[in-house]
Image (tube, rainbow, N blue to C red):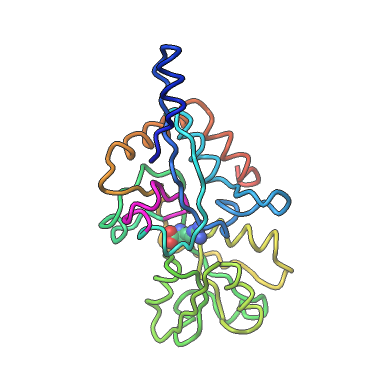
């Protein structure tokens, strides 16, 4: 976290206490609508990006986004390379041993997507025993896929590649966060895939920070609380999930 010297100096000169930090926020921008590259501007946008900026603003902080591999985010927090991970990250007991999570900012769950032509054959995870399941490396979807008896898990750096592989016949299903899969199929799909109704592992998304930085955790939870109370959260939510409300 870099304290802005200019802010400090200006603050000192004009006699205010304005003092903001620049938070280095890591993400994996292949996960629309949570974080993805705007095709026109190439800027990283999405629900998580708007939220973390609004939360930082409550505290007088600014945000600098750093794009990286999803599986590299927790090591980057632990190695002090980033301050926060804002990446649609699900709060799990295993991850809680490694990092601190803020209060929940979104409810998630996993769904299977299959090819339309297979929708009668594969209705639940049990039907995928001894089959191949595509997922994004390091995600809860990948981990759950790994628990299916005899199933082979093909992991990709980005979830978009998993859908392309399924289309080519490389796997029988994609296991991933419901919101992202639904969004992907509606925006990028050609109608050849379908989302199965069962929701696995309903859980919560949080922003992750280092266990060595409890002050930052407190600040982020405070900011989140404030934007939930003052309507900013709802505004951002509606911007990205309007159809669902
Ligand atoms: N919610 C899932 C998890 O925490 C997937 C998150 C993937 N996020 C991303 N930006 N690619 O494992």
| Residue found 54% across the figure and 31% down from its top | 232
Q: Position of residue 38 (x, y in %)?
A: 67, 51
240 with respect to 105 (left or right): right
Which quadrant is home to the N terminus? top left
Task: Residue 67: give x, y in percent of width and height.
Answer: 52, 55
What's the magenta bit mostly, secondary-structure-wise?
Answer: loop
Residue 161 painted magenta:
no
Q: Which residues are magenta?
A: 76-89
Q: Residue 95 appears in which quarter of the rendering?
A: bottom left
Q: Is residue 189 left or right of residue 34?
A: right
Image height check: is 126 above or below 243? below
Q: Is residue 6 above or below residue 93?
A: above
Percent position (x, y) of residue 238?
61, 39
- Residue 77 magenta: yes
Instruction: Please name whichever residue, 243 or 82, is drawn nearer the observer in this view of the structure.
Output: 82
Is the residue 230 above or below the residue 25 in the image? above
Q: Quadrant of the C terminus?
A: top right
At 40% from the left edge and 44% from the top edge, which residue is drawn?
104
Task: Residue at 65%, 46% (x, y): give it.
Answer: 243
As drawn, 176 above or below 78:
below
- Which residue is more in the foreground, 40 or 198? 40
> Residue drawn 29% across and 58% down?
93
| Viewer-nearest residue: 215 or 238 | 215
In the image, farthest residue toward the top: 15
Count of marks, rendered view:
0
């Amino acid at each position: 976290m870099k304290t802005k010297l200019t802010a400090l100096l200006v603050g000192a000169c004009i006699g205010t206490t304005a003092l903001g930090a620049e938070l280095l926020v890591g993400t994996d921008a292949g996960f629309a609508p949570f974080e993805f590259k705007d095709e026109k501007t190439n800027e990283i946008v999405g629900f998580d990006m708007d939220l973390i900026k609004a939360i930082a603003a409550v505290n007088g902080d600014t945000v600098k986004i750093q794009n990286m591999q999803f599986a590299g985010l927790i090591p980057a927090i632990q190695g002090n390379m980033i301050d926060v991970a804002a990446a649609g990250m699900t709060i799990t007991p295993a991850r809680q041993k490694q990092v601190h999570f803020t209060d929940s900012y979104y409810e998630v769950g996993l769904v299977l997507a299959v090819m339309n032509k297979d929708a009668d054959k594969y209705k639940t995870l049990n039907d995928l025993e001894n089959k191949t399941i595509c997922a994004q490396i390091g995600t809860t979807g990948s981990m759950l896929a790994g628990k299916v008896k005899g199933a082979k898990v093909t992991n990709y750096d980005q979830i978009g590649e998993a859908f392309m592989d399924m289309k080519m016949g490389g796997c029988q299903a994609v296991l991933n966060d419901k919101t992202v899969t639904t969004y992907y199929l509606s925006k990028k799909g050609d109608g050849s895939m379908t989302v199965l109704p069962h929701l696995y592992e309903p859980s919560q998304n949080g922003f992750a920070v280092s266990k060595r930085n409890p002050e930052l955790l407190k600040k982020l939870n405070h900011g989140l609380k404030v934007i939930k109370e003052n309507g900013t959260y709802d505004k951002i939510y509606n911007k990205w999930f309007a159809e669902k409300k």
